[in-house]
Image: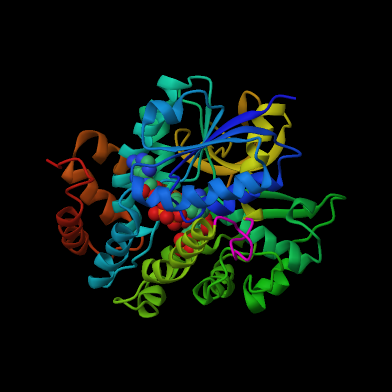
């Protein structure tokens, strides 16, 4: 059986150790001969790499390991690039969240002006690593979950259409874990779902079990009362109290369209006033993550390499990330597994822009994804999605053309922003902080 060579791009990510442990846990169905890390921050990556090297020696000494900041070394002889980079790191995430909030607007990693600012940084980073992959391992596939995935996906569609990149998000997967629990099933994989929308902007229109029994009534009855709030046993992401609030808020999002079940991210677009009122403009999610996940993961990694062994470590297998293995297996073994991916619409949603990057079920095989037909979507969703997809397209155009005007239009068009005036004020503040990362706008 072929063994694969994997490159984790963004090796210094807080998610890297959990993903390495997950890969090791799944070797029986996805054999690996080599794991490499690539990052452009050597110091940050080294902390994670030194610990992961020990984990690998303990659990799978036959796997070759290398951590590098040299693109040629990293991208040569690779089958899959698993990409989770964060251009500008948490320092810039904090500003993405705090600058809009200062103007009374939603401050969020991927939604609204913060997501737009992050997008303007990510596009260049993703194109760069995609270029390295094309140059050094042209047969490889990139499995990308770097954010903001919607903007990144539109950028890759428009600017590098022939590169083999699959864009995927774990939020529907996380929510489906809650749904399965509500429906009394063991796993989300026991459900067959219909879902449509954009990344961080979508709806489930049908959920059945494998026998075809409709699970929507039971899940809806729960959501109507509690949102998606429910205890999921093996969940180790989305566990902070702010995430529970987000899961609960789905109750209110559901009310506006009880024919579907919503993605939790819709709260930023449909309840921006509530979100701003419930935000602390001095301590946002970035602060929580820096004080929580980042301290924990980096602290544990330092402990491991000081001790020279992982015994007693509290690093956990990121089992929920096994969707990345499902995706790699689908490509490698032509499994035709049904997965939600961010792909060009191309008529799958009949009454929607053909060139929009939409999040819909696809069958994934060795030639990539085949999108399933969705048919027509309701006016409410179509209207919201049309506005949001234009935001995403304008950001990519602004980046490619270095256009101040288009980026101002993008921010103004976001449903989270009340006026063109506020959009300009936020934009001018964002420009000041992003000079190192954004193209210079004209
Ligand atoms: P992190 O800051 O801990 O890790 C990101 C790493 O990327 C850092 O080590 C950084 O140095 C590196 N990096 C930045 N720019 C780079 C470049 N140009 N080339 C190479 N490396 C670069 O962030 P995190 O919180 O662990 O998240 C990592 C990424 O995964 C983020 O983009 C986050 O939004 C994304 N994410 C996506 C999903 C999803 O559902 N799609 C889920 C979780 C996290
Ligand atoms: C979900 C989303 C990701 C996002 C993450 C943020 O998993 O799907 O796209 O990056 O949440 O989580 P954090 O813990 O960093 O706020
Ligand atoms: Mn996501």
- Reply above or below: 92 against 153: below
* Residue 332, quarter of picture: top right
Which residues lie in the magenta part? 308-317
**Residue 11 seen in this snapshot:** yes
The x, y position of residue 212, in whole percent, is 84, 50
Q: Is 313 included in the stretch rendered in magenta? A: yes
Which quadrant does the N terminus fall into?
top right
Residue at x-position 44% and y-position 39%: 153
The x, y position of residue 426, in whole percent, is 20, 61
Q: Is 20 included in the stretch rendered in magenta? A: no
The x, y position of residue 94, in whole percent, is 31, 64
- Reply above or below: 423 against 400: below
Q: Nearer the viewer, residue 68 or 408?
A: 68
- Reply above or below: 79 against 17: above
Q: What secondary structure predominates along the stretch shown in magenta?
A: loop
- Total marks shown come to 0
Q: Nearer the viewer, residue 55 or 216?
A: 55
Residue at x-position 50% and y-position 58%: 301
Horizontal placement of 371 versus 439: left or right?
right
The x, y position of residue 98, in whole percent, is 28, 68
Which quadrant does the C terminus fall into?
top left
* Residue 185, quarter of picture: bottom right
Residue at x-position 70% and y-position 24%: 2
- Report the residue that reaches farthest toward the right: 211
- Report the residue that reaches farthest toward the left: 442
Residue at x-position 46% and y-position 70%: 292
């Amino acid at each position: 059986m072929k063994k694969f060579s994997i490159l984790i791009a963004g090796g210094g990510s807080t998610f890297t150790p959990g993903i390495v442990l997950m890969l090791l846990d799944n070797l029986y169905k996805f054999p690996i001969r080599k794991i490499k890390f690539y990052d452009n921050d050597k110091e940050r990556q080294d902390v994670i790499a030194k610990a992961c090297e020990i984990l690998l020696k303990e659990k799978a000494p036959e796997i070759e390991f290398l951590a590098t900041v040299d693109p040629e070394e990293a991208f040569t002889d690779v089958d899959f690039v698993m990409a989770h980079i964060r251009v500008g790191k948490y320092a810039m995430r904090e500003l993405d969240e705090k600058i809009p909030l200062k103007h009374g607007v939603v401050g969020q990693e991927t939604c609204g002006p913060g997501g737009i600012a992050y997008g303007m940084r990510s596009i260049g980073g993703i194109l760069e690593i995609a270029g390295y992959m094309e140059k050094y391992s042209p047969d490889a596939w990139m499995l990308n979950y770097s954010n903001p995935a919607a903007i990144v996906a539109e950028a890759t569609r428009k600017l590098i259409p022939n590169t083999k990149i699959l864009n995927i998000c774990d939020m529907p997967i996380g929510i489906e874990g809650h749904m399965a629990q509500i429906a009394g099933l063991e796993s989300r994989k026991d459900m067959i779902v219909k879902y449509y929308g954009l990344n961080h902007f979508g709806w489930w229109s049908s959920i059945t079990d494998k026998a075809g029994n409709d699970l929507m009534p039971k899940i809806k009855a729960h959501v109507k009362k509690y949102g998606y709030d429910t205890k999921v046993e093996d969940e180790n992401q989305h566990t902070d109290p702010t995430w529970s609030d987000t899961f609960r808020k789905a109750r209110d999002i559901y009310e506006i369209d009880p024919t579907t079940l919503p993605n939790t991210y819709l709260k930023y677009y449909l309840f921006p006033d509530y979100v701003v009122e419930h935000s602390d403009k001095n301590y946002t999610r970035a602060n929580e993550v820096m004080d929580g996940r980042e301290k924990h993961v980096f602290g544990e990694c330092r402990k491991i390499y000081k001790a020279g062994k992982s015994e007693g470590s509290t690093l956990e297998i990121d089992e929920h990330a096994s969707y990345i293995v499902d995706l790699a297996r689908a490509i490698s073994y032509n499994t035709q597994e049904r997965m939600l991916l961010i792909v060009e619409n191309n008529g799958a949603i009949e009454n929607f822009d053909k060139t929009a990057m939409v999040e819909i079920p696809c069958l994934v095989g060795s030639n990539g994804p085949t999108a399933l037909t969705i048919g027509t979507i309701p006016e409410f969703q179509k209207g919201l999605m049309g506005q949001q997809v234009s935001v995403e397209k304008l950001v990519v155009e602004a980046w490619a053309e270095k256009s101040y005007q288009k980026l101002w239009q993008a921010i103004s068009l976001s449903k989270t922003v009340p006026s063109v005036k506020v959009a300009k004020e936020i934009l001018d503040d964002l420009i000041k902080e992003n000079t190192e990362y954004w193209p210079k706008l004209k």
